[in-house]
Every structure is written in C-alpha cells, then in structure tokens.
Image (tube, coloured by chain):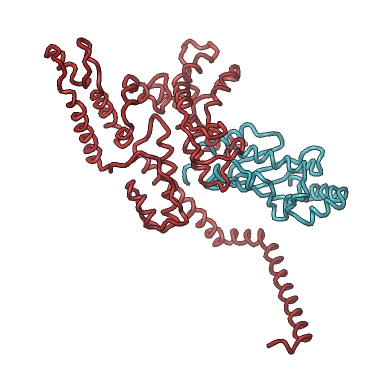
Amino acid sequence: MNTNHPLLASLADEPPPFPDSHPQLQRLDRSVLCTICKEIFRAPVTVTCGHTFCSECIRSSLSVMTDKKCPLCHATITEGSIRRNRAMEEVTEAWETARDSLITLSQPVAGPSRRRPPPEPNSKSSSSTSANLKRPRRSDESRSQSPNKISKKSTDHVDHVVSSDSEEEEQVQEISENDEGECPLCSARMAIASIPMHIERGCPPVSKKKSAPGNQKADWRKVFSMAGSTKEKNVSMKRITSPNYHLATPTDLRNILNEYSLPTVGDKPALEARVRQWIILFNSNLDTEHPKSLSALRAKLNAEEISKKRDKERGRDEAVENLKTTEGFAEHVRNSGAEFERLRKEIMERDAKRAKAAKGLEASSAIEVD
Amino acid sequence: MAALPKRILKETERLMSDAPPGISAAPNNDNLRHFDVTVAGPDQSPYEGGVFKLELFLPDEYPMNPPKVRFLTRIYHPNIDKLGRICLDILKDKWSPALQIRTVLLSIQALLGAPNPDDPLANDVAQNWKEDEKAAIAQAKEWTRLYANGE
C-alpha cells in the first residue's frame, strides 16, 4: 500500500481526530458532519423527513436528481421544503470553538505541557497562533461580533451581505447606533448615537421623535451609496426561484446573470449551467448567519467553472493523445479489438440476412414490387 | 488537475488505511479519480477463492452522481455482462450522495454472494441460472478458477 501518496500529504492539515479512548466524543464529532460532503455543516438546513445537510450540498444534489429523494432515507422531498436549521448552526459553531480544547482535555496527561501537542509541526500552527483555541473558519468573526449580535439580528441582513468584509463591521456598528435605545437618566427613547449628546445637554425632552427615522433613512441611503461605490449593484437578497430551463431563452438567462453582475458569455447550455450553479450558491448563502460577500460567491462560481472546463478538455486530450502513441493505439486495439470484430460480424450477418430476405421477397412477389 | 473535493481525499485516505475485508482500492497516480480495485469472491459463493479486478471512476459530479464501476476480470454472473458492466440499483437510480466508494464496493461484493437472475443484465447467464442453477454455479466456479486466479 502506498502510504506516501500525495493525497495523504494534503490531508495533513486536517484537525486531529479524537482518541479512541473517547468514543462518545468521536460520536459527537461525527454528528456535526454533513453526510454528503463529510465535513462539518456549513449553513445547515433540514428537509421534510428531518435529515440535515449543508445547504449547498442538498441543493446541488437535488439539482441533479430526477426524482428528488432524501439522500439518507429516500423520502420524497422538494427544494421548497428546505428549511434553515438555526439550532444546528449554533451547535456546529459552538462545537467548532470547543473542539480543540476538548481534544486537549481528552489527551492522556503525559507530556509536561497541558496544551495539545500538535501532531504535525506545521499542521495546525496557523490556526493555533492566530487564535489559540479556535479553528480557522469563522474564528474571529463570530467572537468579535457577538456583542453586536442582537442589534445585528434586529436589522436587515441586506447590506450585511452586499458589502465586502471590511465594510461589513463598520456598517453593523453604524446601524446598531441608529437603533433606538433608552436614555439611562430620563428613559426617553431615542437613537443610541444621540444619547451621549442628549445627556450632555441635560436631558431635554425629546420633541423631534420623527427625526430619528428620517435620520435612519438618510443613513440607509448612505449605506446603499457606499455599496454602490464598491461597484455592487443593489441586489435583492431574496431566494432566486429557478426559471423553467426548457422555456427560458438565452436572453432570459442572460438577464438573470446580468442582475447579479455575472458573465453572460457562452451558449445556452453554458448559460444554463451557470445560472443553475449560481442559484445553488446564492440560495445556500442565505441559509447562514455568516453569509459570504457576493464577490466571494462570484469568485467561487468562476473557479468551479474553470476547473470543470479544464477537466473536460484534459480528459479529451488525454484520450486523443493516447491514441497517437503506438503503445496507446495498440492497447486500444487490444482492448476493443474483439468487440469490434464481433460488431463487424454481426453487421455482416445482418446484411447477408437482409439481402437473402429481400431476394426471397422479390422472388415470391415480383409483381407487387413497384 | 482540478482541485479534488476534500471528500474524495478523505475517502481515499480511509480506503487505503482501513480497507474493508476482501477489498482493496487505490487511486491511479496520475488520475486520482480513477481507482484500481480488487474484490475477493465471498465465502460460500461460486466465486469463493477468486480475486476480481475492477475499475472505478469518480465523475466530476461525484458525489452527486454515482461512481462508474466495471469488472475487468471476466465473471459468470447474471447481473454482470461480458463487458463487465454491473446491474446494481445503487449505481443507477438508487444512488444517493450519502453513499460512498466503500459502500459501493461492499454492495458489489454482496452482489457476488447473491446473484439475482430475475433482474438480469447478461440474459444468457440469467437464463441458465434459472433453468439449471447447479450447472450455472459450476460454470461460475470454472470461470472463477480460469480468470479470477489473481494473476
């Protein structure tokens, strides 16, 4: 067995598994894995029968199935029945943050350091230095934003998704300041941002109640103009319903792609594939607390398309190249020679039979021929 | 070479480090989606003692679409034709992305232990199997000895 296979090297930066001495933790570890991608749930969703998958996994698997069934129990399901599973997302995140410390605790106390000794020198170093007990994904984001979480939830997710990551936090801050809060002294309600000024002035009665929403409106405009300045269109963050691909014209498909600033090159099959893949990516991105920016999604779509194309061309080139070499051709002949011979014989026999039958027919009913 | 999904890497690693009994599978060095597989004939079946070579290919859409599997060793079996194609529901309409290479190969091994002449792929073999099971089993044993001797 080839244990030095390049495959194994690329798996080295996997998080270490739990030791066999803790089967219950191993089981817990497995229970937050998606059965389709075998990785920890990303944007978990639940279907009618109650099984949970990553949103992207189940959406893309439904898109290729002719009769749509749950991958685990074969119950009939539809894409419309997919529901976001917030509890599972919370559990997954909590598990991810707790996992490393649990691994440390589950290790038999032998070495002098209580810290988990990294199994490979370079395996986990990046994550353990940047955030000592967190796994790389979502690491800082989820923590640093947690104080704002309530206000963030109360506001819309629209701008949150549209903006690129760096702006995202600023905007979240801004919006939370525009939310209404109570003055700690006179308990009048007003925009949180204006509370300090209000107290400084000695708590004058809040007469301009209407100014707050007006203010908010202006701020929203600012948010959107900012979004515009980063070349993002004002994209609606609603699920895309798939068009009827049989009836859709290339122009229809191009319109959809245009709406999300995606490339519109290619023939109808190419456009259709792109729209399909985009809908999967876009819709599953709406099933999570931590959606990616649209530009990240676009980059992903593009990367997938390129790799698919390369694979296709590669396969074809290889087959043709193989035939060009004498050994390749000889092998092809060896492999398919017998089959070819059989087919040739079959056709010959068929032709002979047909000729015979035709002759017989002619002889018996020469009159009817014309 | 396009990036392989993590899932394929993980499956490969597990297949190579902890293969199911009687089954081995290793990827080609130049195409990691292409596996050379051997399956040992199950005990108490006409294929007992035989070592069957198969090829397995993971299409781009895997795991959304099933892997493509084919016998390279000749075998006398009602659900496997002379080109090595296999009639197995999970390789076709019953495929589910929750299945994996390991489960597919185990199913194929199970198919060797339980031929199903009522859902044939090789009609002549199935016919023999139904008409004279003893003779068919003897034939299968003979073919196993001739072709699946692991050489």
Left or right of A232: which side holds A289?
right
Which color has been applied to chain A in this rendered view? Answer: red
The tally of labels here is: 0
Tell me the residue at 72%/72% (across/down): A350
* Quadrant, the N terminus of chain A: top right
Tell me the residue at 72%/87% (across/down): A368
Q: Nearer the viewer, residue A76 or B140?
A: A76
Left or right of A105: which side holds A251?
left
Left or right of B39: which side holds A196?
left
Residue B52 coordinates in the image, percent (x, y): 72, 45
Tell me the residue at 29%/35% (across/down): A163
> Residue A332's quadrant in the figure?
bottom right
Please identify the residue farthest to the bottom as the structure is shown: A367
Relative vertical location of residue A343 with respect to residue A163 in this rendering, above or below = below
Residue B18 coordinates in the image, percent (x, y): 63, 31
Which color has been applied to chain B in this rendered view? Answer: cyan
* Quadrant, the C terminus of chain A: bottom right
Q: Nearer the viewer, residue A185 or B46?
A: A185
Residue A89 coordinates in the image, percent (x, y): 46, 27
Tell me the residue at 21%/20% (across/down): A190
Q: Nearer the viewer, residue A48 or B53?
A: A48
Residue B84 coordinates in the image, percent (x, y): 70, 52
